[in-house]
Every structure is written in structure tokens, then in C-alpha cells.
Amino acid sequence: MHEMSIAEGIRTVLEDAAKANDFSKITRVRLEIGAFAGVERAALDFAFEVVMRGSVAEGAALEILDLPGRALCYDCAVEVEITDRLAPCPHCGGGRLLVQGGDEMRIKDLEVL
């Protein structure tokens, strides 16, 4: 379950941010996760709750914002949203797509005390 290591990385970032910005409690963490990031939401929710125990984010709400997959279609030269890496272009039906986004994962913002 790689979601546990993701949660551990998030904890490190949060603790560093708390030290650098002088806050003692995080009440909400909003993550942006792309459609192709390969993250199991339920597993990340569980891992986040477990890993944050004893940290500045213990008890914090985790909010996940889904980012769509994006690709550039070589046939119609349009950037489109796709739901699957092998999906045809929803604009022209072409099959020559270059994925441009959807594998990202980042902390969007925090609510702190």
C-alpha cells in the first residue's frame, strides 16, 4: 500500500511548514490528485488518519480534489480532458494523444491555527 508512504511524505511537508510558518495545529488539508496518479482514495484516507497521529495535523480533515486527465490530440491539435490514458480524443475521435496532465499530486492549501 503505497498510500502509507504518501501520507508519511505529506506529514513531513506539514511538519516542515508548521515550523517554518510558526503554527501549531492544522485543521484541514486539501490535496489535488490527478486521475492518473494511481492513488486509492480510501487507502489514503486511512493512511492519513493513522500517520497524522501525534503530529500537528492529528485529527485534521483531509479533502481530496480530483484533477482530470488531460492530453494533447495530435490529430486535431486540441488539449482535451480524458478519463483513461488509452481513450480516444473526445473532440475528433483520434487515437494519437499525448498525456499532458493528470498524474500530479500536491497539497493545495491548509487551514491552520
Image: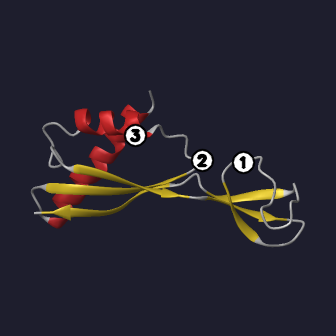
Q: Assign a secondary structure to mark 1.
A: loop
The spot of residue 58 in percent (x, y) is 15, 43
Q: Which quadrant of the figure contains the N terminus?
A: top left
The spot of residue 17 in percent (x, y) is 24, 59
Other residues around mark 2 within 10 Å, as few (<14) / some (14–19) / many (≥20)? some
Q: Residue furthest bottom?
A: 77
Nearer to us in this view, 99 or 86: 86
Residue 3 against residue 59 in the figure, above or below = above
Side of 46 where 6 appears, left or right = right
The residue under the point 12% across, 38% down is 54
The spot of residue 39 in percent (x, y) is 49, 40
The residue under the point 77% across, 46% down is 86
Q: Say what amino acid the circle numbered 1 marks.
A: Arg
Which residue is labeled 3 in the image?
6
Side of 76 where 46 appears, left or right = left
Side of 98 where 57 appears, left or right = left
Other residues around mark 1 within 10 Å, as few (<14) / some (14–19) / many (≥20)? some
Res 113 quadrant in image: bottom left
Q: Residue furthest top?
A: 1
Q: Give the Cα separation between the discs numbered 3 and 1.
A: 23 Å
Q: Earlier in the sequence, mark 3 or mark 1?
A: 3
Asked if the residues shown at circle 1 and circle 2 are in contact, with their CB atoms under 8 angstroms apart, the answer is: yes
Label ID, residue 36 = 2
Which residue is labeled 1 in the image?
85
Nearer to us in this view, 21 or 54: 54
Give the foreground label among 3 and 2: 2
Other residues around mark 3 within 10 Å, as few (<14) / some (14–19) / many (≥20)? some
Q: Earlier in the sequence, mark 3 or mark 2?
A: 3
Residue 78 against residue 57 in the figure, above or below = below
